[in-house]
Amino acid sequence: MMVSPRNLMVLAAVGMTGCMSFPNLGQQPIDGVPGVAHFGTLTPATVASYEDAQNRAVFGEVGPTGTSFAGGFTFDFVGTGEQVCIWVDPEIVTWNSYLGAIGDLVPAEDGAPGSAFAYPDNIGDDGDIDLRVGQSVFYTGTVGTDLEEASARIGNFLVDITDSLGNTIPSDLDLCSGTAALGGRGVPELCTIDTIEGVSYTAAMQAFSVPLDDFRLSYGFLFVEGGCDELAALYSEFAGNKFYTKECVLQGEGLIPGSESGAAAAQAGFPTPSWIGGEAPVIPGSRDFESNFCDDNIDLQTFCVTEAADVEARGLRCAWGEPANEDEGTTRCFCGDPSTLPRLAD
């Protein structure tokens, strides 16, 4: 049986059919923000606590490629015969503002929607990253860190397998297919890989969409020994074994645009811009927002109402769908515009 990567014509077709799905396609590259970044060959970190995991997290930014291809970032690793976990979290969090069942849409006395609606999310600051992992020999993408290197492409693990009868059968050799990878917009994606000792692997994180407010997507990722369930257990223990979602395991991935790379990331030879652990330039207030989102004892509705009141008291307005600029009277808000919720006719 013969295995060969799909040719570039197929890849081009895949890229073009994604035009309706990738809102960053057609956007020009952003100075200082790579469309495709490669972190080289990494070794999985050994983490014994949640604090260890946070200190070993890697953060970065990607933006539009200026081509018909979506951007993203990659890294390689060599199998040890043991399990490894890749956990990637795109900027920032997202939720569905409608929490009721069909038929629950009942107007309140003031004409506002009924209690089935929660405060809306700010959809302008969310992005989506799709995680794929496979043996490097089957990876169809190309590596590049230079913004001017047009040959850099995020690929996949689709190959054509020719059987003994001469039939060509498309096959997806993505080891994360059907797992918790491909989790949706703004949702972390994770994958446990049972590695083969000495075999080279590639992890490809494709920026399926970037935030609509500035077209630059910040992210964080963890590459650690063991399964992803073990990593989640570290957070559960840290949080007192209370209920949590996978959004809570990696926090602080909302980064201040235009920040210089961290010293530790530069020393590691990581692409610009990137950061390791506590050197990440986290957007003020975003950690508090994520902590509130992750705490099942806190009503996120209350946080959002307080955020809106604070912004108004400062004489500012929320920058929904556009970059924040306090000199122009706008600021970053993590919750959305309540006026976008449905209103019912009397």
Image (tube, rainbow, N blue to C red):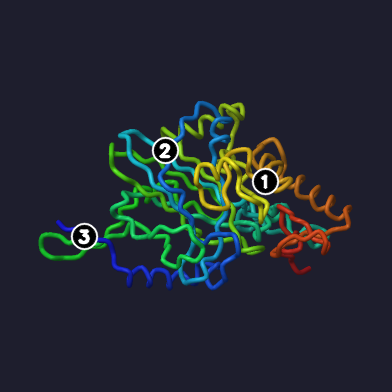
- The x and y percentages for residue 30 are 60, 65
Gap between marks 3 and 2, in whole Å? 31 Å
Give the labeled residue for mark 1: 282
Quarter of the picture containing the N terminus is: bottom left
Q: Nearer the viewer, residue 277 or 284?
A: 277
Gap between marks 2 and 1, in whole Å? 25 Å
Q: Amino acid at mark 3?
A: Ile
User: Along the polypeptide, which appears first: circle 1 or circle 3?
Assistant: 3
Q: Is residue 80 left or right of residue 46?
A: left
- Is residue 341 visible in the rendered structure shown here? no
Q: Is residue 79 left or right of residue 232?
A: left
Disc 2 on helix, strand or loop?
loop
Disc 1 on helix, strand or loop?
loop
Q: Decide: marks 3, 2 in contact (CB < 8 A)?
A: no
At a point 30% along the width and 34% down the height, the residue shown is: 81
Give the labeled residue for mark 2: 43
